[in-house]
Image: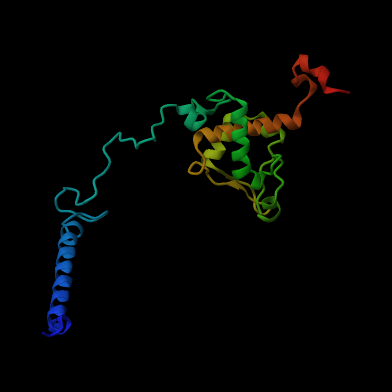
Amino acid sequence: MQPLRSRWNPSLTRLLRAGWVALLALLLAACHQDMYNQPKVQTYDPSTFFADGRGSRPNVPGTVAVGAAQTDDYLYTGLIDGVEGDVMPFAVTRELLERGQEKYNIYCAVCHGESGYGQSMVAQRGGIVPANFHQQRLRDVAIGHFFVIITNGVYRGDPERDGYQSMYSYASRITPEDRWAIAAYIRALQLSQNATVDDVPPELRASLGN
């Protein structure tokens, strides 16, 4: 009797392998064709089905994206009847000011400085003039002014005389709530640098020392 190994046909082995490969290729092709190559309209493709010739359909009028509803005009604009408001849209707490400080140090301090005097490396080398929050003009503005500027940005100045005083909009980077927190912190910075004894509650003035 011949050994079992000697009776095995190498040609049959190759044939079986080729058959399995072909079957696998057919299965993969079958799955791919229906899912990938089905008729469909890609973004911005034209279409003869609709009267306007566009495959992409316009948004239904009045559509609001999830999480994009703005039901409080003042919260999202900082304006009351078109004028910058001088009240916060929510209560100011220690936690809010700490949040404002955190966001201020991330987004604002690089230009305006951590103390708000407009003294920073960007001011020295960037060719712009960051606002000094402690100047009388900005001490007198409504708190909504800071929210509006953070939201919309600002551009003004004479580049030949005093450089550009400009800032782009942070609306896409900072949420409305955090913009208000920054505005509140800026007001706290102003108070910290311009406070008087009269700003201290009477019951605490004795603890100030001499």
> Residue 93: horizontal and vertical position, in percent?
60, 25
Quadrant holding the C terminus:
top right
Observer-nearest residue: 209 or 113? 209
Observer-nearest residue: 93 or 126? 93
The residue at the point 77 percent across, 17 percent down is: 204
Q: Residue furthest top?
A: 203
Q: Decide: is 79 above or below 19.
A: above
Q: How is the image coloured?
A: rainbow
Q: Residue furthest left?
A: 1
> Residue 3: horizontal and vertical position, in percent?
15, 83
Q: Decide: is 182 above or below 3.
A: above
The residue at the point 28 percent across, 41 percent down is: 59
Q: Residue furthest right?
A: 210
> Residue 116: horizontal and vertical position, in percent?
69, 39
The residue at the point 71 percent across, 29 percent down is: 191
Q: Decide: is 95 above or below 119.
A: above
Residue 66: quarter of image:
top left
The residue at the point 55 percent across, 43 percent down is: 153
How many numbered circles does the render carry?
0
Quadrant holding the N terminus:
bottom left
Answer with left or right where residue 106 lies relative to residue 24: right
Residue 29: quarter of image:
bottom left
Residue 104: quarter of image:
top right
